[in-house]
Image: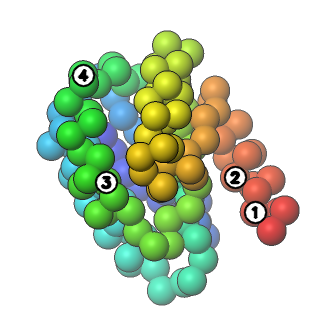
Amino acid sequence: MPITVRWDNEKQTIIYQQYVGQWTLDDLRASFDVTYDLINSTDQLTVIHIIADVSESQFPNREIFSVAEYYKEKKHPKQGIYVVVGSNTILSGMRMITRVARVLIPQAQTVQFAPTVEKARIYLQQKANSV
């Protein structure tokens, strides 16, 4: 599967999504389902953050916007910050999309960007320590 989803830490407070190569909208929807199920599997009240690593991914086509409604339905109430990690080209495109999405989709307010997975983890740790 071109998109894998798993826990990133033992405390089960961060989910790691890795996007590799070309993936389809069906792959994306399936990853949303797995992410929702992982969050739902915890009995804790803790907010669960997500690191989406697109550094080895090909940028999806325009059809990506067609899953916006599905994402809104599958965003779990305990889902927190969504940190996107990737190359400058992919991140530039995603930043532009996110700026537009923030106007249309309230959930997009929690999207952040990081150049590496490690920096994403540090960012989430700093956020956790500031609460």
Residue sitting at 60 percent across and 77 percent down? 46
**Residue 68, position in %: x, y?**
29, 47
Residue sitting at 57 percent across and 52 percent down? 110
- Give the residue number, with chain letter if any, for mark 1: 128
Q: Is residue 125 visible?
A: yes
Sequence order check: which comes first, mark 1 or mark 3? 3
Element at label 4: loop
- Marks 4, 1: nearer the viewer: 4
Tell me how far mark 4 sits from mark 3, CA to CA: 17 Å
Q: Return the mark for residue 124.
A: 2
Sequence order check: which comes first, mark 3 or mark 2? 3
- Marks 1, 3: nearer the viewer: 3
For mark 4, does the 10 Å Cα neighbourhood hold few (<14), some (14 to 19), or many (20 or more) residues?
Answer: few
Q: Nearer the viewer, residue 97 or 35?
A: 97
**Residue 129, position in %: x, y?**
83, 63
Q: Is residue 83 above or below residue 77?
A: above
Q: Quadrant of residue 37?
A: bottom left
Sequence order check: which comes first, mark 4 or mark 1? 4
- Give the residue number, with chain letter if any, for mark 4: 61
Q: Name the amino acid, label 4.
A: Asn
Element at label 3: helix
Tell me how far mark 2 sits from mark 1, CA to CA: 6 Å
Residue sitting at 26 percent across and 60 percent down? 33
Q: Name the amino acid, label 3.
A: Tyr
Residue 116 lies left or right of residue 19; in this view the side is right
